[in-house]
């Protein structure tokens, strides 16, 4: 049966009475800002990814900002990253007064090409900021090796990668376990785990974690939770500039429920991704995503590359007319008006042809835990038919 318009969205968070009850409990407790629920969520997240430290913040953009600030990124510094990412990746670098240096993505995926990093390292390089795009782990082993061999810290933009895994020293480990210096996560509604909005930083460094906790709450020397529980009068101080980057207990309560759901959510998404792969692999014109042998994606999104003779917008519109919502390939930050000033960034000498081609020639298909097997079949059949019809029309 043909679905009605927009019956199949590109994403849908899984929220029900369990999250409602969690929020109700916090509302009735009387403590709704950063407090015991945030602390519990941090502890549970750290346990899940096997990190020494986890610090909750208001969103992933603020997490990236704090991570860069903690390793000392400042005015005039350069940070090697990708343009093929949501704009927040580079914006956080600019918040520090530093310059994003954009390298291209791999030929067979949507992540940073490690082979292009070395040629862009200069005396001003302060960090490498890699992205686990769409939930697919990037080649972190190679990137961390480059960083360590040159004394350059590595930060992971793991916004999409909660629940993804990487083979590290012959063991499967969660993204967020301290492989690089700091990992930053998002809990936006498009992500596998959502708190409405929110973020998390994980690290193996107690020093970094201390800085995150100081800066996220205005630089306050004594958290209000400590003052509230003290039998003595405490005056807090503000020894340095901080920010209001806190997560609320309302968000954290939702996050704790979502985190408990995560293994089942990832398993379901991996099942749906496998169905997509089975349904699309016999359409030779489409390039479908594939996991490297050392990666297990949470399949936050399923992105396919279209053949050059199929127009991206026309294909998306045709699918929309059939009730299937899609999104274009990941943006390229350097093509946005906010980066029109060439002094705001530097493009690698290798240029960004793959990144641009991925933006203009790829589409993100619907994928969410509540999606049915039949809905996946409908989407795959619709896309395959469109490809075949377009091919026939130009033959």
Image: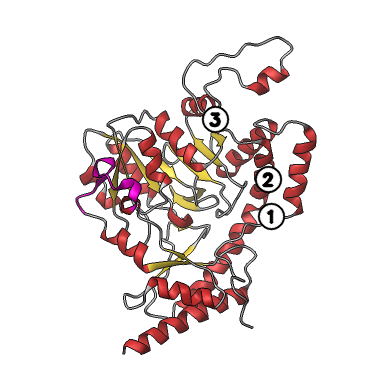
Q: Residue at x 52, y 58 (%)?
A: 300
Q: Which mark is residue 15?
A: 1
Q: Is residue 326 visible?
A: yes
- Residue located 49% across and 57% down the image: 296
**Side of 9 where 242 appears, left or right:** left
142 and 379: which is toward the camera: 379
| Precedes in sequence: disc 3 or disc 1 | 1
Give the mark toward the camera: 3 or 1. 3
Asked if the stretch drawn in magenta spans residue 349, the answer is yes
For the N terminus, give its image quadrant: bottom right
For the point 56% across and 78% down, which residue is it? 377
User: Foreground residue, 359 or 54?
Assistant: 359
Question: Disc 1, disc 2: CB below 8 Å?
Answer: yes
Tag on residue 244? Answer: 3
Residue 69 numbered mark, or none: none
Distance Cα–Cα, label 3 vs label 1:
27 Å
Q: Secondary structure at mark 3?
A: loop
Q: Residue 393 at what x, y percent from top left?
A: 36, 88
């Amino acid at each position: 049966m043909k679905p009605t318009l927009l019956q199949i969205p590109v994403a849908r968070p899984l929220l029900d009475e369990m999250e409602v009850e969690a929020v109700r409990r916090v509302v009735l407790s009387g403590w709704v800002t950063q407090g015991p629920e945030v602390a519990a969520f941090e502890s549970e997240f750290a346990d899940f990814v096997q990190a020494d430290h986890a610090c909750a913040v208001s969103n992933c953009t603020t997490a990236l900002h704090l991570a860069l600030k903690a390793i000392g990124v400042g005015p005039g510094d350069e940070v090697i990253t990708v343009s093929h990412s949501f704009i927040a990746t580079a914006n956080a670098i600019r918040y520090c007064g530093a310059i994003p240096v954009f390298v291209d993505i791999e030929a067979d995926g949507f992540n940073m090409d490690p082979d292009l990093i070395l040629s862009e390292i200069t005396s001003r390089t302060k960090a490498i900021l890699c992205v686990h795009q769409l939930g697919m782990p990037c080649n972190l082993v190679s990137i961390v090796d480059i960083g360590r061999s040159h004394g350059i810290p590595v930060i992971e933009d793991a916004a999409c990668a909660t629940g993804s895994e990487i083979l590290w020293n012959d063991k499967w480990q969660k993204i967020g376990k301290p492989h690089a210096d700091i990992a930053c996560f998002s809990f936006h509604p498009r992500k596998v785990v959502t708190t409405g909005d929110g973020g998390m930083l994980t690290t193996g460094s107690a020093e970094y974690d201390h800085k995150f906790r100081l800066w996220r709450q205005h630089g306050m020397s004594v958290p209000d939770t400590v003052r509230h529980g003290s039998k003595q009068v405490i005056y807090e101080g503000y020894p340095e500039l901080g920010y209001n980057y806190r997560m609320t207990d309302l968000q954290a309560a939702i996050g704790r429920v979502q985190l408990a759901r995560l293994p089942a959510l990832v398993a379901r998404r991996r099942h749906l991704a496998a169905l997509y792969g089975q349904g699309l692999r016999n359409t030779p014109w489409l390039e479908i995503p594939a996991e490297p042998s050392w990666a297990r994606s949470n399949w936050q999104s399923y992105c396919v590359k279209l053949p050059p003779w199929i127009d991206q917008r026309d294909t998306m519109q045709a699918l929309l007319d059939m009730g299937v919502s899609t999104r274009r390939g990941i943006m390229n930050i350097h093509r946005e008006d906010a980066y029109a000033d060439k002094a705001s960034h530097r493009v690698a000498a290798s240029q960004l042809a793959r990144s641009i081609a991925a933006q203009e020639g790829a589409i993100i298909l619907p994928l969410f835990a509540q999606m049915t097997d039949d809905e996946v079949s409908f989407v795959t059949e619709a896309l395959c038919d469109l490809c075949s019809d377009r091919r026939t029309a130009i033959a």
